[in-house]
Image (cartoon, helix red, strand yellow):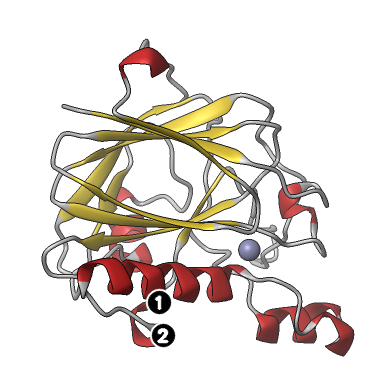
Amino acid sequence: MSLSTARDPVTAIHDQVLPSGEGWTHELRPGQVLRLVDLEGNQAADTLFFHADDPAERYDAQATITGQQQIYLSTGSELRSNRGRVLATIVADTCGRHDTLGGACSCEANAVRYGLDRTFMHSCRDTFLLALARHGERTGQRLGVRDLAPNLNFFMNVPVTPEGGLTFADGVSAPGKYVEIRAELPLLAVISNCPQLNNPCNGWDPTPIRLLVWDA
Ligand SMILES: [Zn+2]
């Protein structure tokens, strides 16, 4: 199911373009809505959510999947925490499908999948750690490698094959497609705009995303 909304970027309280390969952290109060826009199409936005006041509670892929009995995310999906609570709800989605299984690219995965010469290419795992470190410098809230649970991937197409395998496929997204997430609890959103060059998750051409936030 996809659903668009009439939220006007002019009324957003936050509006920025995040280049590929860069990280972003932002706190959302309950009721605030975050929109991610896939500006040029076929761009994966790797995302983590934490409870802003108690980051030991965070997005949990297993709780989310079992809660909705569905591996893909779209309008109406409730993003659940490791304590079973609803952290956020997807309230609009013009793309139609988002991934819960593919995880984040890392130097280890790059080496295993694509060769040792790819080990030190940029990766979402490194971007997450850098973004969390910068967040810690600003706020004193220290989050690091032990806080990297399996993430979700907006706009990324990771279909499950009939044999039960996972494939990175060409994107289901397109220029201007967007998804909106409403915070149900105080949230820390952490995004890595994926720099991956070795598979089709970014169409072999990582591109910027736009991030907007509206008040409740
Ligand atoms: Zn990545």
Residue wearing tag 2: 145
Residue type at mark 1 is Leu
From the image, tell me which residue sits under label 1.
148
> Residue 203, which numbered label?
none
Q: Is mark 2 within 8 Å of ligand 1?
A: no
> Residue at the location (40% across, 77% down)?
148
**Relative to 106, does residue 208 appear above or below in the rendering?**
above
Task: Report the label total.
Answer: 2
Ligand 1 image position (quadrant): bottom right
- Residue 184: % across, % down: 15, 43
Residue closer to the observer: 113 or 210: 210
Is residue 32 rendered to the left or right of residue 117? Answer: left
Q: Is residue 82 visible?
A: no
Classify mark 1: helix, strand or loop.
loop
Q: Position of residue 77 (x, y in %)?
A: 33, 41
Crowdedness near tag 1: few (<14), some (14–19) or many (≥20) residues, C-alpha within 10 Å:
some
Q: Quadrant of residue 163?
A: bottom right
- Where residue 132 sits, quadrant-wise, is bottom left
Amino acid carrying mark 2 in the image: Val
Instruction: Tell me: 146 left or right of 1.
Output: left
Which residue is at 15% across, 68% downward? 83
Q: Is the CB–ligand 1 distance for label 1 below 8 Å?
A: no
- Give the residue displayed 76% in from the left and 75% down from the top: 121
Query: Tags 1 and 2 in contact by the CB under 8 Å rule?
Result: yes
